[in-house]
Image: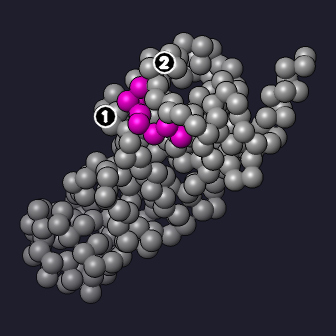
Amino acid sequence: MRKNINWLFLNTYPGQIMLQTWLTSQGIERSSSSKYVKEGLLKRLDTGVYCRAGKEPGWVDAVHCLQTQWNKPVHIAGLTSLNLQGSSHYLELSTARMWLNLPPRVYLPKWLQHVPGVKWYSAANNRLESADNAFLKEVTVSSLKITCSSAELAAYEVANNVPKLIEFTHANELFQGLISLNPKKLQLILSASDAVKTNRVFMFLAQRNQHKWFERLDVTRIKMGNGARQIEAGGRLDTDYQITVPASLIRNIREDEQF
């Protein structure tokens, strides 16, 4: 028993979140975890989920737990990934909005609700099979290494979640700052995507902001489908990509073309 306590002190940190399955693999059975809760060494977040006492766990601790103990591929996605990489000016300091990409038919664990100051969102896209290591990167936050989307994949994930998780106009403002995306990586992602709506939204936002990388994308290799699609309820139809968008974006395009 004393050996297990020493191991916890030496190999975990205050606020670290631990799944019982992981603790068991380290030689700490459920009965011991319950005893450590009574002694104040651990705090129970939910059934089979604990954190080391001494500090409230944060979103970084939760993501690190998912990525190192959950045995399912998960990465920080979309808006959150762009925030971490400095590509967004919309970092929310009071309540963090965490976008996570999960595998098909895998859902956010309920214990995440017990992490204070965080709202969790699933930004999964079951119609894209290109989210391999080439489109992921590792960042360090509070001395912990966590995996997130590359800027290229994050931009695609933003387009994929219009308007479910992000407003069209907000997505457009984000795209304004994405001046240095890699067109080769973008082409691979978009060519692998079967999500017609997402592809059209992405191409609309890319064309509208006229970055140099847009000119190097081959639209003939991207699935665009046929017929009009509604994205923005009550919006106006963009005739190039046959999607409804906010009227302000159509108007601004026309105003720009007059000068």
- Residue at 66% across / 24% down in the picture? 207
Give the extent of the magenta segment.
189-197
Q: Which mark is residue 59?
A: none
- Residue at 25% across / 53% down in the picture? 72
Secondary structure under the numbered disc 1 in the rendered image: loop
Circle 2 packing at 10 Å, graded few (<14), some (14-19), many (20+), is few
Which is nearer the eye, 65 or 239? 239
Which is nearer the eye, 152 or 70? 152
The residue tagged 1 is 132
Circle 1 packing at 10 Å, graded few (<14), some (14-19), many (20+), is few
Residue 151: x and y, percent?
50, 32
Secondary structure under the numbered disc 2 in the rendered image: helix
Count of marks, rendered view? 2
- Residue at 41% across / 36% down in the picture? 194
Is 82 in the magenta? no
- Residue at 35% across / 62% down in the picture? 107
The residue tagged 2 is 220
Query: Residue 173 occupies which quadrant of the picture?
Result: top right
- Amino acid type at mark 2: Thr
Q: Which residue in the rendered view is the most extreme toward the front?
A: 227
Q: How is the image coloured?
A: one colour
Residue 59: x and y, percent?
46, 58
